[in-house]
Amino acid sequence: MDDNVTKTLEDMRSYFEETTAELLMMREMDNLEMYRMLTDLGKELEGLSAEEKTEENFVYGCISNVYIADDFRDGRVYYRGVSDAHVVRGYLAVLINAMSGLTPEDVVTGTREAVEKFARETDLKASLTPNRANAFGNIYKLMVEKASKHA
């Protein structure tokens, strides 16, 4: 993922729609294919340095260890993250890919509906354990909190 890409809310919505379609197509073939796709997306994450794995970057409420760091450049917020669970790392990658490059104001006020629609249409709660489904919401919540500090 290019760290300097700027995005609009429409770009974010399009990314979620395309990813939703791909995940649902994979699920129709076989649920395992959907998980493979998520795992592959997660492999694209750069990860974080040991110094970035701080309490401030830790996502609470997940059974796996998830960390999200943010950078603020040129009026845009860019996220990086890591998880020790493969599927959660995939969902983390989806959120990072969708929301990195937005303005903090867009993250805070304009992303909730698209994120909820993605979760609903991909049926996160049915395809993940309850704790992993909660991780998705907790990751999103921390991303919004981080953006609000720059808004």
Image: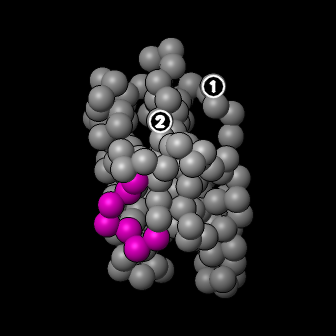
Whether pointer 1 and pointer 2 mark residues with C-beta atoms closer than 8 Å, the reply is: no
Please provide percent x and percent y for residue 148.
29, 32
Mark 1 vs mark 2: which is more N-terminal? 1
Which of the two discs, 1 and 2, sits closer to the camera?
Answer: 2
Left or right relative to 82: residue 45: right
User: Residue 129: which quarter of the image?
Assistant: bottom left
Query: At label 2, which amino acid type do we have?
Result: Asp
Magenta-colored span: 58-64
In this view, the residue in front, 49 or 42, is: 49
Instruction: State the residue position of label 1.
Output: 4
Please provide percent x and percent y for residue 56.
36, 45
Query: At label 1, which amino acid type do we have?
Result: Asn
Q: Residue at x 64, y 31 (%)?
A: 3
Left or right relative to 69: residue 89: right
Q: Secondary structure at mark 2?
A: strand
- State the residue lying farthest toward the front: 51
Q: Please determine whether, in this image, residue 50 is positioned above or below residue 62.
A: above
